[in-house]
Amino acid sequence: MKHFTSANDSADPLVLARQTIALKNQKQNFEHLGRSKTLGLVFFNPSLRTRMSTTKAAYDLGLNVLVLNVNGDAWNIEFEDGTVMDGSSQEHVKDAIKVMTGYCDIIGVRTFAELKNREDDYTEPVLNAFLEYSEVPVISLESATLHPLQSLADITTILETDISNPKIAVSWAPHPKALPQAVTNSFLQWIKFIEAEVVVAHPKGYELHEEFTGGFELTNDQSYALDSADFVYVKNWSSYSKYGQRPPVSQNWTITSEKMAATNSGSFMHCLPIRRNVVAEDQVIDNSLIYKQAKNRETAAKTVLKNILEDIN
Ligand code: CP
């Protein structure tokens, strides 16, 4: 594996999930793989799970870790080529990446969608700048359109339950702020590799790009999606067609215990962080797979880093 920015970077995402399950149960020590090597983690946006789980995974593999929070801790970065940099930007992205990757053997980057211009976000300018200028493997720690480490942890969590051919309801849920589509896009990209019946439910106006929803059943009826579901994967996202907006929603899409009662004793899933009693009721969240998903982030990151280290060693 050279880079890890999407399911397409893995020869077989299902094999990667099976490797993640196997690695969890393996007592073998892999610290020699990362010895004298450095992982750089560059954050343009906040993080709890990605930061901690990837750092822990790196330490387990013997890697040193350098973390840079770009906003506040670094110079203001210019992304446009050919700009006369006489304004507030102090360093060009090309120079920053070439310097940072000079200190690292692998580099991870988190860069969220800005939700101002769809074309800008969906062409992934920051992630692609890392791919262009980095001379070392690049890992996405969540980009404008995808969150592959989360998705690998999510499908691993589903596979671990050993439910064959499950029904998976993917449901939009309310949120007070406009959020990117990355987590849901990515989950749909990865879930294609599992034998499952997938139904995607969202209010009108919240249709996702067909690159991700193609082949799945789509509905505006949340109760239809949840009926007999084995897993209820919940996330908020803003509109793709009216990009970054939050079209009004008349019905209540919060996941309640009453709604979960219509599932097949289904498991609630969410990537976290979650707004309690907005996205889902406390009782739903407290009886869910969320902590297993978060824990699996550690082994998912370890699996990806291990694959990359085995290739570069
Ligand atoms: N799910 C996830 O990526 O969490 P963080 O934003 O806290 O890293």
Image (tube, rainbow, N blue to C red):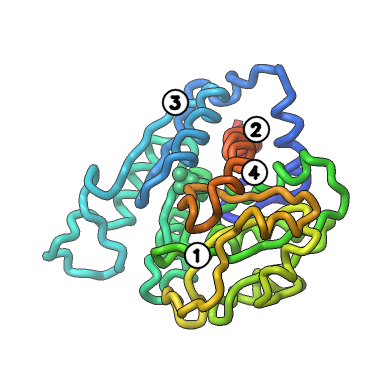
The percent position of residue 26, horizontal first and vertical second, equals: 73, 22
Q: Is residue 26 above or below residue 49?
A: above
Residue 8 can be seen, yes or no? no
For mark 2, does the 10 Å Cα neighbourhood hold few (<14), some (14 to 19), or many (20 or more) residues? few
Q: Residue at point 42% right, 58% down?
A: 112
In this view, the mark in front (2 or 1) = 1
Q: Amino acid at mark 4?
A: Ser
- Indicate which disc residue 64 carries: 3
For mark 4, does the 10 Å Cα neighbourhood hold few (<14), some (14 to 19), or many (20 or more) residues? some
The percent position of residue 134, horizontal first and vertical second, equals: 44, 49
The residue tagged 4 is 288
The residue tagged 1 is 174
Q: Amino acid at mark 3?
A: Asn
Q: Amino acid at mark 2?
A: Glu
Pointers 2 and 1 in contact (C-beta within 8 Å): no
Outermost residue on the right side: it is 164
The residue tagged 2 is 310
In this view, the mark in front (1 or 3) = 1
In this view, the mark in front (3 or 4) = 4
Measured Cα–Cα span from mark 1 to mark 4: 18 Å
The percent position of residue 186, horizontal first and vertical second, equals: 61, 59
* SS category of the residue bearing label 4: loop
Of the image marks 2 and 1, the number of the one nearer the N terminus: 1
In front of the other: 219 or 250: 250
In front of the other: 163 or 96: 163
